[in-house]
Amino acid sequence: MAFPTKGCSQDPTFSQFYSNPLYLNPALAGTGECSRVMFNYRNQWPSMPGNFVTYGASADHYVNALSGGIGVIFTSDNAGNGIMNTTRLSAIYAYHLKVSYNVSLNAGFNASFHQQKIKSSDLIFRDMIDPVSGAINPGNTGEVPIDNSTVSTADFNLGLALGIKEKYFVGFAVDHVSQPALNYYENSDNNLLYRKYTAHAGARLNLSSNNYTRNGDGLVLSPNILYHQQRNAKQLNAGFFIERSPLIAGIWYRHTFDNPDGIIFLLGIKQKRFKFGYSYDLTLSKLKGATGGAHEVSLAILVGCNKKRNRPGAIKCPEF
């Protein structure tokens, strides 16, 4: 079996998409009530060999002098027990515009260093497997060695986010705008990092009286929807959060358009200085019972919450 000189894949996806706002949409940089330092961990399909493990760390801050938010984000994705690794380091700026008393518009730009590595020595090809015993003979292959085990490129993302009355929100982002090439073989056709389109929208609805909610003890419902498309890979998440301080719970249905993919369950806690969330993805596809689902953990540390900032408007997105 020949090693493919061209392959397709999709970017890592977080179930707690609003707990990793800079990864979701660069326009969300600086939208928090406080400056934020955020950490994310995802272990997808832990019961299967070669599971996917993704780490993320990010920080953002609103700067009055820049009329917007700045941020940095680091992401590392390991697939196949580390055979393939993707690393990204990004810098973000989002301009915040007060369109009217009730409407705010953010425009974000992300510039990234993107690197992918493959451990070719750990790859197993068909001619390395003994057809009788099934034993693997390392190095016994006629496959052409990979020219570049590490490929790197500059990459750029764009995003918009619109907030209305600090209650309704909608956003749109395009990742990998220039579709850079990542070639492991010198003589292969360009393996493009295909554009990813993201659309998200929702609301924060106070179900208690204004005074109750102002004191942080009220009940808040936040229905929201997320759509991803990267070439032929499509995904739709629909669900809601419900919050009664300090607890947050949520549930979403995820569909890939080819089949129902999963149900996401979330539990979180929100305090003045930090937020913590845990979610579990229950697999609904034909792989159910074999994957072990997916576990995801998020932690946000909030700083500078007591400082008054001359902000031109806010977009109240969910926090997990």
Image (cartoon, rainbow, N blue to C red):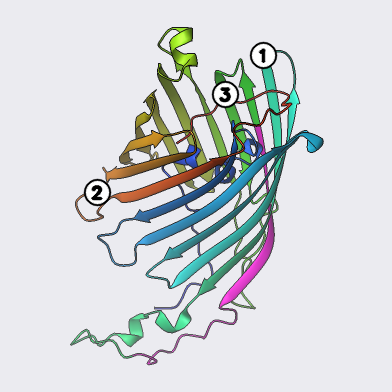
Instruction: Tell me the SS state at disc 3.
Output: strand
Q: Earlier in the sequence, mark 1 or mark 2?
A: 1
| Closest to the observer, 237 or 78 | 78
Instruction: Give x and y (percent) for residue 82.
Output: 42, 71
Left or right: residue 42 versus residue 48 is right
Instruction: Give x and y (percent) for residue 23.
Output: 56, 46
Instruction: Give x and y (percent) for residue 217.
Output: 40, 18
Label 2 belongs to which residue? Answer: 286
Q: Amino acid at mark 3?
A: Phe
Label 3 belongs to which residue? Answer: 169
Name the residue located 34 percent from the left edge and 62 percent from the top edge.
Answer: 51
Q: Amino acid at mark 2?
A: Lys
Instruction: Give x and y (percent) for residue 192.
Output: 61, 60
Instruction: Tell me the SS state at disc 2.
Output: loop
Left or right: residue 309 versus residue 239 is right
Q: Earlier in the sequence, mark 3 or mark 1?
A: 1
| Residue 101 located within the stretch drawn in magenta | no
Label 1 belongs to which residue? Answer: 102
- Residue 172 marker: none
Q: Are marks 2 and 3 in contact (CB under 8 Å)?
A: no
Q: CA distance from mark 2 to mark 3?
A: 35 Å
- Which residues lie in the magenta part? 138-160
Q: Residue furthest right?
A: 65
Corner quadrant of residue 246: top left
- Of marks 1 and 2, the one in the foreground: 1
Name the residue located 48 percent from the left edge and 61 percent from the top edge.
Answer: 77
